[in-house]
Image (tube, rainbow, N blue to C red):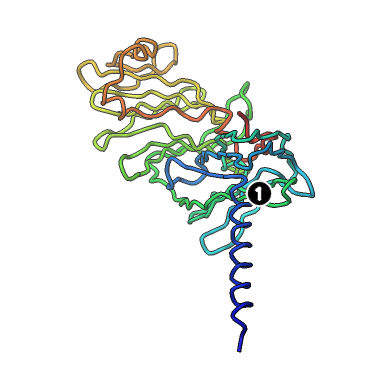
Amino acid sequence: MFPIRQFFKGILLVLAFAGLSQSAIAQLQVDISLKRTLYISYEPILINVSLTNLSGNPLPLSDANGNHWFGFQIETLDGRPIAPRSSNYSNEPLVLAAGQKLSRTVNLTPLFPIGEFGGYRVQAAIYAASLKRFFNSPALNIEITDGRPIFQKTVGVPEGMLGAGEIRNITILTHRLPNSTQLYVRIENAKGGKVYCTHRLGRLVSYGIPEILLDKKNQIHVLQNVAPKAFLYSQIGLNGEVLVRKTYNQIVKRPILREGPDGKIQVIGAQEIDPKAQAAKPPVPSLSDRPISLPDSATDAPSDEDRPRQLLSE
C-alpha cells in the first residue's frame, strides 16, 4: 500500500512547484491588445504590447543566448507557425524598473507574411536573460479577409516620379465591419507583386458612392460620404503616400470632384472644414462617425520594410 506520508509529501511538492511556477510567471506581465480582429489583406495590423515588471527589482532586457528579447509568435489556427520576414534584427537593451510599465504599438504587416486569407493566432514573446526564460502574452486571434473591389485601374508611373516607367494596379475596396462599412485603397506593382499600401480611408455611409478620379499624374483622388452632409477628400500617390486629407461639409447638393483648368482636382459644392477650428470646438456625438486618421509612416510601412531595431519605448 502506498504510504500516506509519501502521498502528502508528493502533494506538497506539486504545490511548491506550482507556486514557484506562478511566482516566475508573475515576474513579468506581458499583454497585447487590438482595436479589432478582422482585417483585409495587407492592411496595417497595429498591435499594442505592454510589459509590467512585477519582480520587485530592476529587470534588464537584452538579446542574449541566441534569443531576441522582444518578438512575436504567430501561427495559423491549425497550428502552422509563421516565420518573420527577417530574423536578422536586434533590439536595443533596456532596464525595466520595479513596477514600471512600458507599451508600444507595432505594425505586424511588414514584419510577418500574414497576407493570406484565414485566421492567425498572435502572441508577444519576451525573453529575460537574467531569468533564463520567455514570458508570453495571452494569445489573440485575428482574421484576414478581403474587401469588395468597386474600382480597379492599371496605370503607369509618369517620368520624374519615383518608380517612373513602372506599372501600378490601383484598387478601391469596401469592407464591412460589424458597425460600419470602411473604404480602402490598395496600390500594387503590377509585375513585382509588391504592395505599396493598403490604406483605410475611413467610414463610408451605406447610401454613399465615392467619387474617384485620377489626375494627369495618375494620382488617386477620392471623395467619400462619411456622415450626413460630411465628406472626406483624400489624395494618394502611386507609391502609397498620403498627400492630402481634408474634410468638407455639403453646401446644398452632394459635392463632386472636377478637374480644374490648371489640371488640379477640385471639390465642388462643399465647404472645407478648418481642422484648427474643429479641434477648438467641444466634442459632439456625431464626430464619432468621422473616419479615424490614417496610420502614419512610422506604422504604415511598405511590406518589405526592415524590422524596427527598437520595438518598445517609454
Residue 11: x and y in percent read: 59, 71
Residue 230 image point, x, y percent: 28, 23
Q: Is residue 271 above or below residue 203?
A: above
In the rendered view, does 282 fall on the left or right side of 170? left
Vertical arrangement, residue 159 with respect to residue 30, above or below: above
Quadrant showing the N terminus: bottom right
* Callout 1 amino acid: Pro
- Given residues 161 and 141, the one toward you in this image is 141
What is the quadrant of residue 245 in the picture?
top left
Q: For label 1, count other residues whose C-alpha is less than 10 Å away and answer few (under 14), some (14-19) or many (20+).
A: some
Q: Residue at x 56, y 42 (%)?
A: 109
Residue positioned most to the front: 5
Q: Which residue is mark 1?
A: 84
Q: Find numbered disc 1 in the image and state the secondary structure of the residue it sits on.
A: loop
Quarter assignment of residue 62: top right
Which part of the image, by quadrant, shows the C terminus? top right
Q: Residue furthest left?
A: 252
How far across and how far down the image is residue 66, in percent? 78, 49
Q: Nearer the viewer, residue 55 or 51?
A: 55
Count numbered badges in the picture. 1
Taking the spot 34% from the left edge, 18% from the top edge, the residue there is 267
Q: Position of residue 225 (x, y in %)?
A: 30, 28
**Height in image: 283 above or below 314?**
above
The single residue placed furthest to the right in the displayed view is 65
Give the residue at the far bottom of this rendering.
1
Residue in the picture at 46% in, 20% down: 244
